[in-house]
Image (cartoon, rainbow, N blue to C red):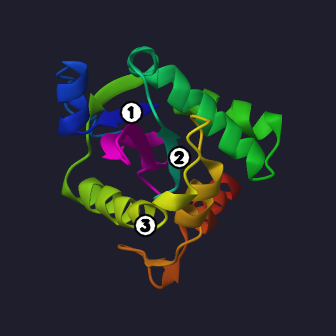
Amino acid sequence: MEFGYTIPLQRHLNLKPPSPAEDAAPFFCWDIHMLTVQNRKTALALNRASRYCILLYGMGAADWVRLPELVRDEIRAVILREGLSEFEAARYFALAGPLRIAGAHGARSVTALNWAMGILLRHAALLDGGRLSQPRAAHIMNNTVYHMAGRTGRGSPRECFLLSFRRL
């Protein structure tokens, strides 16, 4: 599994990770960006293959230290929320391999993050300041239809994410 940190996140964490792996399977790669929404630090993670998003809102200093663990836990939680089984979640992480932190995966990933941020900002009123995980806002982001580059047609991140599970 590879987490690609954007430059703003790298600066925030005082970290300069290595370049992304050339052979990393996109379904097991998540680009993670730090942004401020309603004066609260927010981590937005986006699956490179599907644009499936997870959102952690109101991150404190201790949360940033645990960012990889928090993102992994949230990925597991969304797999289960999508109706997939514990077995499928365990299989996803087993096939993903050990965690590797890298830089973001280039212009295409930044474009996808910008797309997700646009949706997030339009629905910022749905964010719940009482919890870190934001499934309600992420649900809207993950069900928004977009033109899928490299594929014919349109679809939602949720459809693409679940389709990728069927192909495992």
Q: Which residue occupies the foreground of this view, 13 or 50?
A: 13
The residue drawn where x is 79% and y is 48% is 84
Tell me residue 27's x, y (percent). Answer: 49, 48
Circle 3 is placed at which residue position?
119
Q: Spatial distance from mark 2 to mark 1, Cα to Cα?
A: 13 Å
Q: Which residue is mark 1?
A: 3
Label 1 crowding class (10 Å Cα cut-off): few <14, some 14-19, many 20+?
many
In the displayed structure, does residue 5 sit left or right of residue 44? left
Question: For the point 81% across and 34% down, which residue is it?
Answer: 86
Residue occupying the point 42% across, 75% down: 148
Can residue 25 be seen in the rendering of this structure? no
Q: Nearer the viewer, residue 33 or 92?
A: 33
**In the displayed structure image, the side of residue 59 where residue 93 appears, left or right:** right
State how far apart marks 3 and 1 are (Cα). Answer: 22 Å
Magenta stretch? 24-49
Of marks 2 and 1, which one's residue comes earlier in the chain? 1
Magenta span main SS:
strand
